[in-house]
Image (cartoon, rainbow, N blue to C red):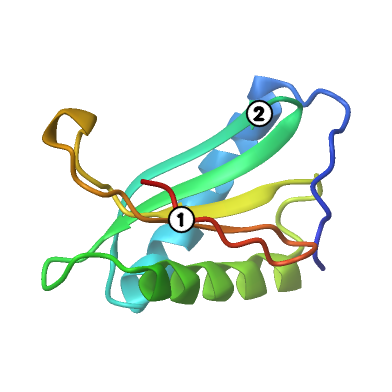
Amino acid sequence: MSRKNTKNKKVKKETLDFYLNSLKPKLEEIVNSLGYTLNKLVFVTENEINYLRLTISRLDHTISIEDCEKVSRCIEDKLDNSNSIPISYTLEVESPGISVEDQEVKTEFVLNHSDMLWTVRV
């Protein structure tokens, strides 16, 4: 079940932390099963929108938009089917990137559950 992420009632940090802690093992398992490593996982509210953000990597190649899409779609299917997060949120899967000082490109894929929004950030 997809959840449209619109500006919503403020969700307490404790609530986001609860969902994050309960989902972390499941998300690590999904990411690892696809051949990636979960580097970072956060659940935050910015401008009244909840974001579940995963940073993934892989030793044998740089993460591409296609990699982020693959992980995002798999996670979306599993989370939506299990109704694990009963609040509105946006799922973001991104690469670790390089620090701004190194002037390298950071690729990020953003999937909005309601209308498939793709974003590439540099």
**C-alpha distance separating marks 1 and 2:** 21 Å
Image coordinates for residue 65, horizontal then vertical, percent: 40, 68
- Of 9 and 23, nearer the camera is 9
The residue singled out by tag 1 in the image is 120
Q: In what quadrant of the picture does the N terminus appear?
A: bottom right
Residue 110 as seen in the image, left or right of residue 113:
left
The residue singled out by tag 2 in the image is 45
Residue 81 as seen in the image, left or right of residue 106:
right
Location of residue 43 (image quadrant): top right
Most extreme residue toward the right is 9
- Of 67 and 24, nearer the camera is 67
Image coordinates for residue 70, horizontal then vertical, percent: 46, 76
Label 1 neighbour load within 10 Å: few <14, some 14-19, many 20+: few
The amino acid type, in three-letter code, at marker 2 is Thr
Residue 25 as seen in the image, left or right of residue 10:
left
Residue 79 as seen in the image, left or right of residue 100:
right
Image coordinates for residue 102, horizontal then vertical, percent: 12, 35
Secondary structure of residue under mark 2: strand
Secondary structure of residue under mark 1: loop
Location of residue 62 (image quadrant): bottom left
Location of residue 3 (image quadrant): bottom right
Give the numbered dot on residue 51.
none
Name the residue located 73 percent from the left edge and 61 percent from the top edge: 113
Name the residue located 38 percent from the left edge and 67 percent from the top edge: 31
The amino acid type, in three-letter code, at marker 1 is Val
Q: Earlier in the sequence, mark 1 or mark 2?
A: 2
Rendered position, 120 above or below 115: above
Label 2 neighbour load within 10 Å: few <14, some 14-19, many 20+: some
